[in-house]
Amino acid sequence: MKAYGVAGLEGTGLYVILFLTNDLMFTSRAGGAVAKLGAALKIAATETLLLDNLATAEPGSVVILDLNAPGVDPASVVPKLRAAGLPPRAILAYGPHVHEQRLAAAVAAGCDEVFSRGQFSGQMDAILAKWLAAPR
């Protein structure tokens, strides 16, 4: 797991974005966007790591699911996230626009917002700012 600005976050009240992906290039861009918003980014390569990270995160975390990452199944992970002791304030998902069924599956699973990769990449700052500004 790669973490951007998260060492010793427990009890700080700092917003944390939990990101399930294996795309290192995109995580670098996301890390910059999150840092500009005064939050921290935690990357998880598996569903298990994502759930472990959520268990230790501050209340009000936002989860991002990369639908193109191997093994990401919104129908499996979203209910687990919602049932967590400290459920996230939002679950966002994105994937290639040509994977319409995966995007639709994320909507059906209960993600708060679902984007094509291009939409998410182009509007990342505004999308994250919207969810970080929402009341905890």
Image (cartoon, grey):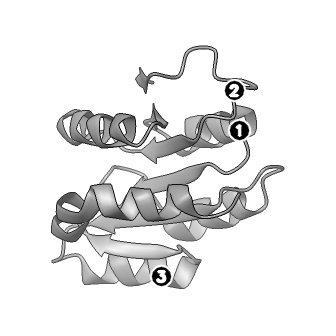
* Residue for point 47% across, 82% down: 107
Please state which of residues 135 and 26 is positioned toward the viewer in this rendering.
135
Q: CA distance from mark 3 to mark 1?
A: 25 Å
For disc 2, the neighbor class at 10 Å (few under 14, some 14 to 19, many from 20) is: few
Residue at numbered disc 1: 58
**Which sits earlier in the primary sequence, circle 3 or circle 1?**
1
Q: Quadrant of residue 33?
A: top left
List x then y, in percent, for residue 91.
54, 63
Can you tell which of label 3 and label 2 is closer to the viewer?
A: 2
Give the residue type at disc 3: Val
Indicate the amino acid at tag 1.
Glu
Would you say the residues marked 2 and 1 are in contact, meaning their CB atoms lie under 8 Å apart? yes
Q: Earlier in the sequence, mark 2 or mark 1?
A: 2
Q: Position of residue 89 (x, y in %)?
A: 65, 61
Label 1 sits on a secondary structure element that is loop
For disc 2, the marked residue is: 12
Q: Which residue is mark 3?
A: 107
